Each structure stands twice: as C-alpha cells, then as structure tokens.
Image: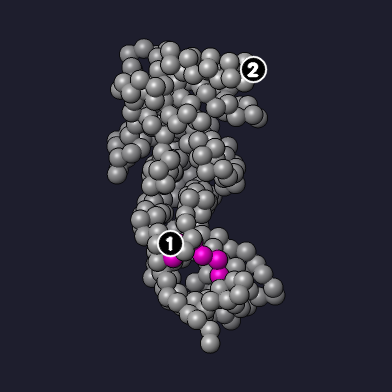
C-alpha cells in the first residue's frame, strides 16, 4: 500500500520531467526540503497547474515513492503573484529561494525558515513596481535584509557589530570621508584595520603568498573575488542595521546597498558552498539604472 503524508510547503524550484510533469523543490514546515513530482501540471487542462508555480504555498497530500515522491493533491493557502511584476522582484525572490534551498534541512521540521522566507517574500511583493533608481535601491536593501536574516537563522551571519579579533565595538565615523574598517569573508565579519592587517600577515606566512586587501571598487570589478577588503562608514552602518526586524529610515542610499548586497552574496556563497545563480539576474536588473 502506498504511504501518504501531509505537508504545508512553498514551491522554491521547478524543473520539467517527462512529457507533462514537473519536479518541484518545496520547503515544508513539517519535513523541511522535499522534491516531489507534480504529475500532469504542464497539460493545459491540469487542475493543479497553477498550484505548481513558484512561491505558491500549498497544503499538500504526497505519496511516498521509490526515488521521488508524488504530489496527489494541492490546495493553495497563499500565492505571491506580485513577485512576477518586474525583473527585480522576481530575481530577488529567486535569490532568497536559492539561499533557503542551500541552508534548509531535509526530513526535519523547518518551521522557522518557512515563516522567515514567507515574510521576506511578502515584503518584496509589497514594494513598488515602479522602475526607477530609488525603487531599485529599496529593493536591494530589502533583499540584503532577507539575505542577512536567512544567514542568521542558519547560524552563519557575519559579525558586524564588533571587531572579530578584539571584540571591541566598531562605530562608523561619518565625519571622516576616508574612514574605513576591515571585512574578512572567511574569518566571519568585521575587523579593525590594524587587526585586518595582522590577519593578512598571518595568512601570508601560512600560505607563503602575498594576501592583499583591496577597496570595494576593486573587489566588485575583479573577476576573482577577494576575501579581505575595506568597507566605509555607510557600508558598515547598513550592515549593522540588518539584524533588526525592520529596516530603518534612509534605506535608499543606492551605492551603499548595491555594495552591501555584493558583500553578502560573496559571504553567503563562501559559507554555504554554493553559487547564487539569481545574483546575475539582480546584476542585469541593476544595469538598467545609473547607480
């Protein structure tokens, strides 16, 4: 007899299989990440075709299979149609979905991750659909907020409040336009410049090679991403507010938020061991604006 189980899940990834089926990657509250076949959903008259779309939340009845489980029933609880209204929203949502897939567990309840991802998808959906520079900056700020929260839930968020070496608080100095502090991706966050220099010297002695830091502009334009670099006061301040439940006022600093997303993208890829493919879609979206 075929065993069945119930779960509430959000569709994060979809791939065609066979003539009319799809394989869905679903984040469920009860069983974490699952992959299941949605039979016949590519047929024009499929009764559950729309329920297999990305970011739809369904109550599912699933039959256990030898290699892949099969969805036998789906009742929609919530959908996010607004995410497909422009490239920015859709790319940001897919970006967060990739992070959730990379950090989620299988065969274990993932209720916190389920609710956290759903909340940030809803926030993205509520953003303006206007294609202008300020709206794009706000979207990137909210994307960065979601990235940080997902990393924090996975226990991987960078330390940005204190120096990782001395544990002394780092306070951005807005009165000095040249003020900077250090950031190390492999070492987990922020460092004072002197401690970053010590870290680089230690790495150089261990590897026998020169391990130089660089400015944000060099990092963002380099094909080989650097792992130690300097950040300015605005970037540190933006990073420091990301742990808060809500973003504060003044989140439309365009250049800063693009830089912060770039930092977090490289940080997430390093610590999760994955490539965030939707990052290139975000880059394409931002190229249409003069940041």
Q: Quadrant of residue 279?
A: top right
Q: Residue 74: where, in percent of width, then height?
A: 46, 76
How many residues crowd around disc 1 within 10 Å: few (fewer than 14), some, or many (20 or more)?
A: few
Q: Secondary structure at mark 1?
A: loop
Residue 177 at x, y percent in the picture: 40, 14
Magenta span includes 187:
no
Q: Residue at 52% across / 50% down in the picture?
A: 102
In terms of image quadrants, where is residue 22?
A: bottom right
**x and y, in percent, of residue 166 in the image:** 35, 20
- Magenta stretch, residue numbers: 31-38
Q: Nearer the viewer, residue 110 or 126?
A: 110
Residue depicted at 53% across the width and 87% down the height: 1
Residue located 41% across and 34% down the image? 158
Residue 100 in sight from this viewpoint: yes
Q: Label 2 neighbourhood size at 10 Å, few (<14), some (14-19), many (20+)?
A: few
| Quarter of the view holding residue 42 | bottom right
Q: Give the secondary structure at mark 2.
A: loop
- Apparent side of residue 280 relative to residue 166 in the rendered image (left or right): right
* Residue depicted at x 35% and y 56%: 112
Q: Which mark is residue 108?
A: 1
* Mark 1 / mark 2, whichever is N-terminal: 1
CB atoms of marks 1 and 2 within 8 Å: no
Determine the CA span between mark 1 and mark 2: 43 Å
In the rendered image, which residue does mark 2 sit on? Answer: 209
């Amino acid at each position: 007899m075929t065993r069945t189980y119930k779960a509430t899940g959000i569709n994060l990834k979809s791939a065609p299989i066979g003539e009319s089926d799809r394989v869905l990657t679903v984040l469920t509250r009860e069983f974490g990440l699952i992959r299941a076949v949605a039979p016949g959903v590519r047929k024009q008259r499929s009764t559950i075709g729309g329920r297999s779309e990305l970011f739809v939340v369904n109550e599912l009845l699933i039959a256990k299979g030898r290699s892949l489980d099969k969805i036998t029933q789906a009742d929609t609880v919530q959908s996010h149609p607004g995410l497909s209204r422009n490239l920015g929203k859709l790319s940001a949502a897919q970006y967060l979905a990739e992070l959730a897939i990379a950090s989620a567990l299988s065969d274990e309840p993932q209720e916190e991750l389920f609710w956290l991802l759903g909340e940030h998808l809803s926030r993205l959906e509520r953003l303006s659909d206007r294609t202008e520079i300020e709206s794009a900056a706000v979207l990137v700020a909210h994307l960065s907020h979601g990235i940080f929260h997902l990393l924090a839930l996975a226990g991987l968020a960078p330390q940005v409040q204190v120096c990782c070496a001395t544990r002394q608080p780092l306070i951005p100095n807005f009165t000095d336009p040249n003020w900077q502090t250090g950031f190390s991706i492999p070492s987990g966050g922020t460092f004072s410049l002197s401690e970053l220099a010590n870290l680089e010297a230690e790495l150089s002695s261990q590897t026998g090679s020169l391990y130089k830091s660089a400015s944000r502009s060099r990092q963002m334009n380099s094909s080989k991403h650097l792992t130690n670099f300097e950040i300015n006061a605005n970037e540190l301040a933006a990073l420091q507010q990301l742990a808060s439940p809500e973003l504060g006022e003044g989140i439309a600093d365009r250049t800063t938020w693009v830089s912060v997303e770039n930092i977090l993208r490289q940080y997430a890829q390093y610590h999760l061991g994955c490539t965030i493919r939707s990052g290139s879609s975000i880059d394409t979206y931002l190229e249409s604006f003069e940041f």
